[in-house]
Image (tube, rainbow, N blue to C red):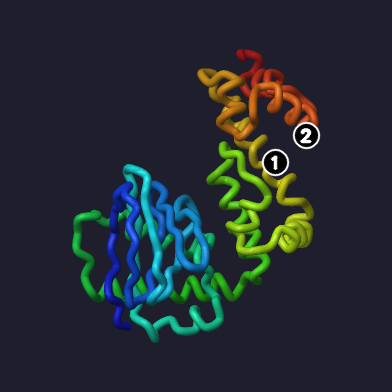
Amino acid sequence: MDITAVEVRSYSGEVERHRHDFHQVILPCSGVLEIETGRRAGRVGGTIASFIPAGCEHTFSAEPENSFIVLDVPPGVWTRAIDDEIVPPFFAIGSAVQGLVDYIKALSPQARLPSSLCEAWSTLLLERLAQQSDQLDRVELAVRRAVAFMKCRLADPIRVHDIAQAAGLSQTRLHEAFLNKRATTPHAQLVELRLDAAERMLAIPTLSIAEIAIRSGHSDQSALTRAMRRERGATPAEVRCSLLGGNA
């Protein structure tokens, strides 16, 4: 397989716009990369990667302290992914792909990867991505994109419209997808994720409940208290007391 490049790259915070004549897979190592293509806008970071088709104009900018594994793939090597839209613009990576990412991360970022290693690693990566996509239907992939978007934006005042846009579905189809795949609604999922985040932070005694409320996407401490009492049957102070063994 003639792979153009496998590199660990860092990006500046400036917005850049370009296109290239090869497909590109961007896998997260650290930090977040904002990408906007003709197909969709989203973030690469955590467990979310991106696929940019050849010829697709896109813009990108990154937060400080970032690194990403970038794979450039010549047209014709991965035609099926384009024709069948097997790999969406933003997608969650599974454990097998994460293992390949971790392998590259373990190497020195300054080291030039031998061509034989690039070819073997790239072949494995593309095979794993194809297998991963074959095992998941498109509705499940859309739900995963929606959940990943929520997790990245918990502290922001996001709406169901924003979640649907990130998932690549209409609001109606997003609602149906969550009911079918998660037996809940997008809004209820967001509430749960925010409360989960709040509970994790309540175990940190140096954080005030008011600060935790804002960080977990609640408008203020009262909003967090109402939501936690309604959904979890306890106030933030009671949860903190339980987590800290009565030493809150």
Q: CA distance from mark 2 to mark 1?
A: 8 Å
**Residue 148 shows which numbered tag?**
none
Residue 37 visible to the viewer: yes
Q: Quadrant of residue 233?
A: top right
**Which residue: 56% across, 23% down?**
211
Mark 2 secondary-structure assignment: helix
Q: Quadrant of residue 134?
A: bottom right
Report x, y in % for residue 50: 45, 63
Q: Nearer the viewer, residue 129 or 243?
A: 129
**Residue 192 shows which numbered tag?**
1
Q: Residues within 10 Å of mark 1 (few under 14, many from 20)?
A: some
Residue 94 visible to the viewer: no
Report x, y in % for residue 69: 34, 60
As drawn, 220 above or below 126:
above
- As drawn, is 138 to the left or to the right of 84? right
Q: Name the amino acid type tagged 1.
A: Glu
Task: Give the position of the C terminus as an image quadrant.
Answer: top right
Task: Give the position of the N terminus as an image quadrant.
Answer: bottom left
Q: Quadrant of residue 217?
A: top right
Contact, mark 2 vs mark 1 (Cβ under 8 Å): yes
Identify the residue under disc 2. 231
